[in-house]
Image (spheres, rainbow, N blue to C red):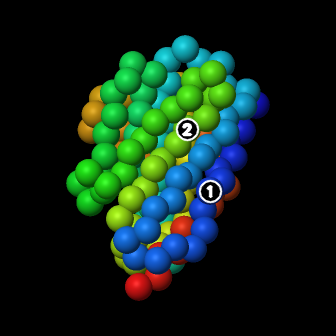
């Protein structure tokens, strides 16, 4: 059974940085995509960054140049380095995974992912 466990969330001041981690287990697919999503209270879940096993990445326009998604295949861990954080980016951040490759336009669509973690809270204060 696939399990995704996020960590690394916390509180940071505006302009600060955090690195989120997502440890995956029970995931033995050779082709896959993984992504980070976030959801603030009262708002829809939105895609932040995604990566597939072929190295393709995708970022939301709002985070380009500030966030970096990466993976350590040997450790089965997905990362999200977040720099220059803004208060409006306070949210619960979720890791998601699915087998197979996705076209770029589908990499950040929440409904296209089968497996989800429980989330890690990120709070950015002004």
Question: Up-down: is 107 above or below 65?
Answer: above
Q: Residues within 10 Å of mark 1 (few under 14, many from 20)?
A: some
Q: Choose between 20 and 100: the one closer to the eye.
A: 20
Image quadrant where one finds the N terminus: top right
Disc 1: which residue: 8
Circles 1 and 2, Cβ within 8 Å, touching? The answer is no
Per the image, label 2 sits on a secondary structure element best described as strand
Question: Up-down: is 29 above or below 34?
Answer: above
Question: Is residue 113 in view?
Answer: no
Q: Position of residue 9 (x, y in %)?
A: 60, 62
Q: Residues within 10 Å of mark 2 (few under 14, many from 20)?
A: many
Q: Position of residue 69 (x, y in %)?
A: 42, 41
* Disc nearer the start of the sequence (1/2): 1
Most extreme residue toward the top is 30
Image quadrant where one finds the C terminus: bottom left
Per the image, label 1 sits on a secondary structure element best described as loop
Q: Residue at x 55, y 14 (%)?
A: 30
**Res. 2 image quadrant:** top right
Q: Residue at x 48, y 66 (%)?
A: 39
Q: Choose between 123 and 52: the one closer to the eye.
A: 123
Q: Position of residue 108 (x, y in %)?
A: 37, 45
Q: Position of residue 113 (x, y in %)?
A: 50, 40
Q: Residue at x 49, y 18 (%)?
A: 31
Q: CA distance from mark 1 to mark 2?
A: 12 Å
Question: Is residue 86 in view?
Answer: yes
Which disc is residue 49 wearing?
none
Q: Residue at x 47, y 82 (%)?
A: 125
Most extreme residue toward the right is 1
Disc 2: which residue: 78
């Amino acid at each position: 059974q696939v399990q995704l466990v996020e960590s690394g969330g916390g509180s940071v001041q505006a302009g600060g940085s955090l690195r989120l981690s997502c440890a995956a287990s029970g995931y033995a697919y050779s082709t896959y995509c993984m992504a980070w999503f976030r959801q603030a209270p009262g708002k829809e879940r939105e895609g932040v960054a995604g990566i597939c096993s072929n190295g393709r990445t995708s970022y939301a326009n709002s985070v380009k140049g500030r966030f970096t998604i990466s993976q350590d295949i040997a450790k089965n861990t997905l990362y999200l380095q977040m720099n220059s954080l803004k208060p409006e980016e306070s949210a619960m951040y979720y890791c998601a995974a699915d087998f197979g490759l996705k076209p770029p336009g589908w990499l950040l669509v929440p409904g296209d992912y089968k497996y989800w973690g429980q989330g890690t809270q990120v709070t950015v204060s002004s």
